[in-house]
Image (cartoon, rainbow, N blue to C red):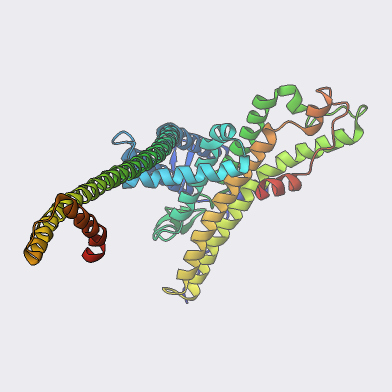
Amino acid sequence: MELLTKLGINWQLLIAQIVNFLIVMGVLGYFLYRPILNLLDSRTERIRKAVEEAKRIEHQAQEMAKLREEEMKRLDRESGEHFDRIRKEAAELNAQLHATAKKEADAMIQNALKRIDEERRIMMEDVMKTVNTVIVRMTEKLLEREFTPADQKRIQEQLVAELPNMVR
Amino acid sequence: MASIEPPTLASETIAHIGSFEVRNTLIMAWLAMLVVFALVFFARRTKFKEIPGRFQAFLELIVEGLFGFFDSIIGDKKQTRTFFPLIATIFLFLMLANWMGILPGVGSITIPEEIHGEMLNLPIFRSMNADVNMTLAIALISVIATQLFGIAALGILPYANKFFVAPWRDPIGAFVGILELIAEMAKIISFSFRLFGNIFAGEVLLVVISFLMPYLAPIPFLGLELFVGFIQALVFSMLTAVFLKMAVTAHGGHEEHGQDGEHAAEPRSLESDVAEMAHA
């Protein structure tokens, strides 16, 4: 008892302090802890939802990027194939045109050669005729006589036989 | 030469309301309460907002920090939420009162009072926890709350089995039960005298240092007292949290071997539990 007196323990004061503490606890608990903890809980929940939503959107964006990439690859592949096909067609067309042009050119050359040969032949015939006539006339002049048809024929045959050597 | 008047063990009675003694530590308790109420009033002038202002953010920081700290000890959010008002109030109220105890004027503003025919200068304000009545009050609340929460969580009989075991069934368990019962009583004494001793010693230290080397020399000791005030509040609240957790946790033996207590496992020592909690 003496110790209790020395320490100043007083049951009324003890109860008063207990009541004081309980009041403080009640006030803090009701007006401070509970609203703040509720607020923090709701905020945590909201943040959790926002993070989930952000993750979902990110996932969606990744999916879309993947789809876009795949689409781009497909388009690249298709355009490449298209380009190759066009190039191949162009090469074929080019070759075809070349072949046609060559054929036409060959035909034109053949025609021209034919025409040249024909004209040469005609010209040779004209020349032969003219030369025959000239030769006969000159021989008649030189010999001052008329050749008989048989002579003329013999001379002409002789000249015709020698003419190619002379023309060359 | 000036004489030094060290604080007395008992708090001083400043006034009377009927037979009720209004002591200087009680006045400090009321002042601390006033500060708490002012703080709460200031905080609740407007509704808490989703996007907090500076003051709300400060309060959230304190409450969230404390909740996280105690949750790391208790390890169960639901239980922490249940115990939080008690342990957080113990921490905040004790720390506030401890810090208010070193404010200028506390212990130095006096009124003359005639006691046993002798005129004495009694300090009007004295640190709230430099009075065993206050520390004992909180210790009682802490220990009684521990028992109540334990009973609420486990049921009255399983909880009582912790202390009362039939000696003819389990003599060692019965002896340990008595020890547990004594430990519960000892908690009240250790809680109250640890806090009282630290704060009272701090008061004496400050008075002595102020007397020996006034002005500058007490400053580091004021810092020390701030630290002691914080640590003591922390220790009190942390131990309460640990004891609460222990009280609501079923005994290993009861869970594993049924409720009859026949094969109750040997109870774990208090030290090992505290060490485990502190480690957690």
Residue B147 can be seen, yes or no? yes
Q: Is residue B163 left or right of residue A75?
A: right
- Front residue of this view, candidates B96 and A134: A134
Measured as percent of width and height from the top left, residue A138 is found at 9, 63
- Residue for point 89% across, 36% down: B172
Dividing the picture into quarters, in which one does residue B269 lie?
top right
- Front residue of this view, candidates A128 and B28: A128
- Residue B256 to residue B199: above or below: above
Measured as percent of width and height from the top left, residue B213 is found at 47, 76
Q: How many marks?
A: 0
Q: Is residue B133 left or right of residue A161?
A: right
Q: Is residue B129 left or right of residue B100?
A: right
- Residue for point 23% across, 55% down: A157
Measured as percent of width and height from the top left, residue B228 is found at 54, 58
- Front residue of this view, candidates B39 and B208: B39
- Residue B140 to residue B207: above or below: above
Q: Is residue B256 left or right of residue B111?
A: right
Dividing the picture into quarters, in which one does residue B261 lie?
top right
- Residue for point 44% across, 46% down: B62
> Seen from this angle, which residue lies furthest right?
B168
- Residue B91 to residue A156: above or below: above
- Residue for point 75% across, 47% down: B272
Measured as percent of width and height from the top left, residue B194 is found at 63, 52
Residue A36 can be seen, yes or no? no
